Image: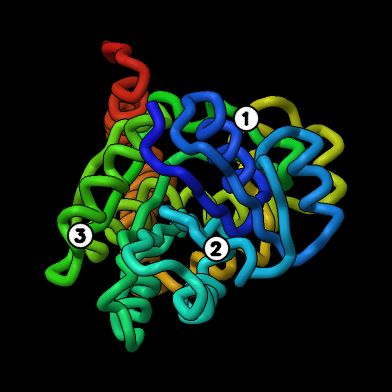
Amino acid sequence: MRQFNKIAIIGVGLIGGSIGLAIKRNRVAGKVMGIFRRRSTLRRALRFKAIDKGTMDLKEGVKGADLIIIATPVSSIPALFRELIKHAKRGAIVTDVGSTKSWIVDRIEKTPGLSSIFFVGSHPMAGSEHSGVEFAKEDLFKGSPCIVTRTKKTNKRALSKVINFWKALGTKVEVMSPARHDRSVSIISHLPHIVAFSLAGAVPKKELLYAAEGFKDTTRVASSDPLLWSDIFLTNREELLRSARIFERYFKKLTSALSKDSRLRLVRLLKGAKAKRDSLTGQVSA
């Protein structure tokens, strides 16, 4: 069902492209405009039918848009917001897909002239280790969680529209504060990525000759874009460091059981970890 006449997507890579495809599949908007700094990317987005029209001109792209989605690296989002509000129509709603929320929301809410433009932070919890519109999928968000953030300054009507938008794309929406979001994703998203990067980086290159599926599965997300993830790590630094300390404590319990040759202790720790992992797929651990 159509919710908006025109939606503009700034950044049509994997996430932005998948949003465009999902919008079109679910007929959420009459027109999808893609905005990107490289013409070659816009051509690919048009070829893959992720957008209806593309432009490199921000002013042209956001003109008349009811909803503007910023799907770029975290560190670029506040500056893009400050620029686009000069050209967006009165009453336009702006959201983002950034994996960090407090850093983004704090800066955006301090922007002068917000009385006629409404911002609601979003984070669809879906993705891939790949990047680029060629990897976009129209069903990428189906069944996945999407966190929408609310603060004292959030406009209720805009919040409702953003929630309904993500639901139309098939996500399961949860509303929470930016701080609560950052604490949660630091341990279930950011920490696994930094651990995967650490493991991949620690292994001597010559040993990779013998790497099988276990190593490949465990380090899959280490193939993600380093620039994008360094942005995420640094803008959620305090929460990530807190989560890293939790990880270190559990890891030390495992290595302590090893050093003491305590099979009983080791099995107990491994069983506890297995039970949590099995719960994700509905399995019941023995």
Within 10 Å of disc 1 (Cα), the crowding (few <14, some 14-19, many 20+) is: some
Estimate the x, y position of residue 147 in percent, counting from the top left: 31, 47
Estimate the x, y position of residue 130 in percent, counting from the top left: 70, 42
Give the residue type at disc 2: Val
276 or 223: nearer the viewer = 223
Mark sitting on residue 62: 2
286 or 281: nearer the viewer = 281
Residue 27 seen anywhere in this rendered image of the structure: yes
| Secondary structure type for disc 2 | helix
Residue 91 relative to residue 39: left or right? left
Mark sitting on residue 137: 1
User: In what quadrant of the picture does the C terminus appear?
Assistant: top left
Mark 2 or 1, which is nearer the eye?
2
Spatial CA distance of label 3 from label 2 is 24 Å
Residue 244 seen anywhere in this rendered image of the structure: no
Give the residue type at disc 1: Lys
Q: Nearer the N terminus, badge 3 or badge 2?
A: 2
| Secondary structure type for disc 1 | loop
Q: Nearer the N terminus, badge 2 or badge 1?
A: 2
Q: Residue at x 36, y 18 (%)?
A: 281
Quarter of the image for residue 180 reads: bottom left
Within 10 Å of disc 3 (Cα), the crowding (few <14, some 14-19, many 20+) is: some
Within 10 Å of disc 2 (Cα), the crowding (few <14, some 14-19, many 20+) is: many
Residue 44 relative to residue 285: left or right? right
Q: Nearer the N terminus, badge 3 or badge 1?
A: 1
Quarter of the image for residue 111 reads: bottom left
The furthest residue to the left: 152
Mark 3 or 2, which is nearer the eye?
2
| Secondary structure type for disc 3 | loop
135 or 11: nearer the viewer = 11
Q: Which residue is mark 3?
A: 150
